[in-house]
Image (cartoon, grey):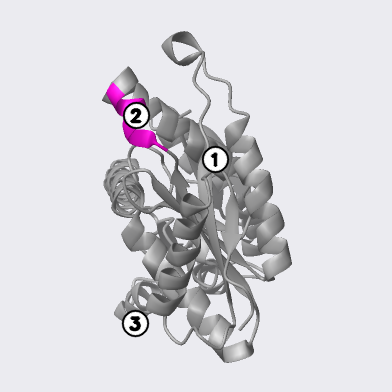
């Protein structure tokens, strides 16, 4: 899909002049027109637009008011706005730039100048969009375990700190589940690490499927996972843990793993708890419950009882 431009001007002949100039290029696949700022804003809120040409002097919502409305909405702030003005005074130009315009053209302008300025700002917009995508990818890579696509341990600790602070402040409950694959070393020894990775991925998918929108899950270690459940009591956390244990046990593999059945041990700790004063306390108690599950035969859930 190509670029889209929005042209806002109360004079149809001037809009047509701009369209005639741009139609001779392959810069845009979509052209939108509006006779004033309000019409332009309605289009902008419903259509994908890459650049805006907007007249300053219009009835109702003029160019400066339109610019203020665009800048007030975060999702629109990165769209370049080129103001068109018949005033050549320096004060008008400075006002346009100070209020967030990317550029301005003084009427009457030549088609060559219009085209050159549009190309420059369209190129800058493309570079800006590409940079934003790369930054988002880098952020995802920094926060995500590449094998399972769950959060990594570092990001989970940040999430956990925020939830711990919220719970301590308002007294709302939340649960931490630590989940460990039973006898996973035997899986790697029998099937190899490549198929062992598939087992980890399948486990992660089962965990992801169990999440509510506001829950968080992470690969916490080699074959250990962590699940953070806000607004969840001990009874609720135990129910989630048991469903998850059963769901993982019911995973059916294909190919070389078709005869494999896996199980997990799960430790549950819930805030608030009089023996939990720090995040380290919370993790330690959940870890203790996990190892209790291991000692009691694996493939089971153990939780920290109320103090």
Q: Position of residue 79 (x, y in %)?
A: 44, 55
> Which residue has dot 1 on it?
16
> Which residue has dot 3 on it?
91
Which residue: 43% across, 59% down?
81
Q: Earlier in the sequence, mark 2 or mark 1?
A: 1
Which residue: 61% across, 72% down?
174
The quadrant where residue 73 appears: bottom right
Which residue: 46% across, 74% down?
282
**Mark 2 crowdedness (10 Å alpha carbons): few <14, some 14-19, many ≥20:** few
Q: Is residue 199 depicted above or below 274 in this figure?
A: above
Q: Name the outermost residue toward the top.
A: 255
Q: Position of residue 176 (x, y in %)?
A: 53, 65
Q: Earlier in the sequence, mark 3 or mark 1?
A: 1
> Is 245 left, or right, of 257 in this rendering?
right
Seen from the viewer's position, the closer of residues 112 and 133 is 133
Is 224 within the magenta?
A: no
- For label 1, the SS is helix
- For label 2, the SS is helix
> Which residue has dot 2 on it?
186
Task: Kindly report the distance in space between the C-alpha atoms of the residues bearing marks 2 and 1.
Answer: 73 Å
Which residue: 49% across, 31% down?
202
Which quarter of the image is occupied by the C terminus?
bottom right
Q: Which mark is residue 199?
A: none
Q: Nearer the viewer, mark 2 or mark 1?
A: 2
In the image, the segment drawn in magenta is 183-189
Q: Is residue 255 visible?
A: yes
Q: Is residue 43 depicted above or below 112 in this figure?
A: below
- For label 3, the SS is helix
Seen from the viewer's position, the closer of residues 109 and 151 is 151
**Mark 1 crowdedness (10 Å alpha carbons): few <14, some 14-19, many ≥20:** some
Q: Position of residue 40 (x, y in %)?
A: 62, 56
């Amino acid at each position: 899909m190509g670029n889209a431009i929005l042209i806002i001007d109360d004079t149809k002949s001037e809009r047509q002049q701009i369209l005639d100039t741009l139609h001779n290029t392959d810069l845009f696949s979509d052209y939108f027109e509006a006779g004033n700022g309000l019409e332009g804003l309605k289009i902008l809120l419903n259509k994908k637009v890459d650049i805006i040409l907007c007249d300053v002097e219009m009835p109702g919502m003029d160019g400066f008011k339109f610019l203020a409305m665009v800048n007030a909405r975060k999702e629109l702030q990165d769209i370049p706005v080129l103001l068109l003005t018949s005033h050549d005074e320096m004060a008008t130009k400075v006002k346009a730039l100070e209020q967030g315009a990317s550029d301005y053209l003084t009427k009457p302008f030549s088609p060559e100048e219009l085209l050159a300025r549009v190309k420059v700002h369209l190129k800058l917009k493309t570079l800006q969009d590409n940079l934003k995508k790369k930054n988002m990818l880098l952020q995802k890579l920094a926060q995500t375990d590449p094998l399972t696509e769950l959060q990594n341990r570092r990001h989970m600790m940040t999430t956990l700190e925020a939830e711990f602070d919220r719970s301590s402040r308002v007294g709302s409950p939340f649960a931490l589940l630590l989940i460990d694959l039973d006898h996973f070393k035997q899986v790697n020894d029998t099937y190899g690490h490549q198929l062992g990775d598939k087992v980890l991925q399948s486990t992660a998918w089962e965990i992801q499927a169990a999440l509510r929108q506001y829950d968080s899950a992470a690969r916490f270690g080699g074959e250990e996972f962590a699940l953070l459940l806000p607004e969840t009591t001990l009874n609720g956390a135990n129910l989630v843990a048991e469903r998850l244990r059963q769901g993982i046990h019911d995973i059916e593999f294909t190919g070389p793993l078709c005869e494999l059945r896996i199980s997990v041990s799960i430790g549950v700790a819930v805030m608030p708890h009089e023996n939990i004063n720090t995040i380290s306390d919370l993790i330690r108690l959940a870890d203790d419950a996990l190892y209790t599950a291991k000692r009691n035969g694996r493939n089971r859930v153990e939780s920290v009882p109320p103090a």
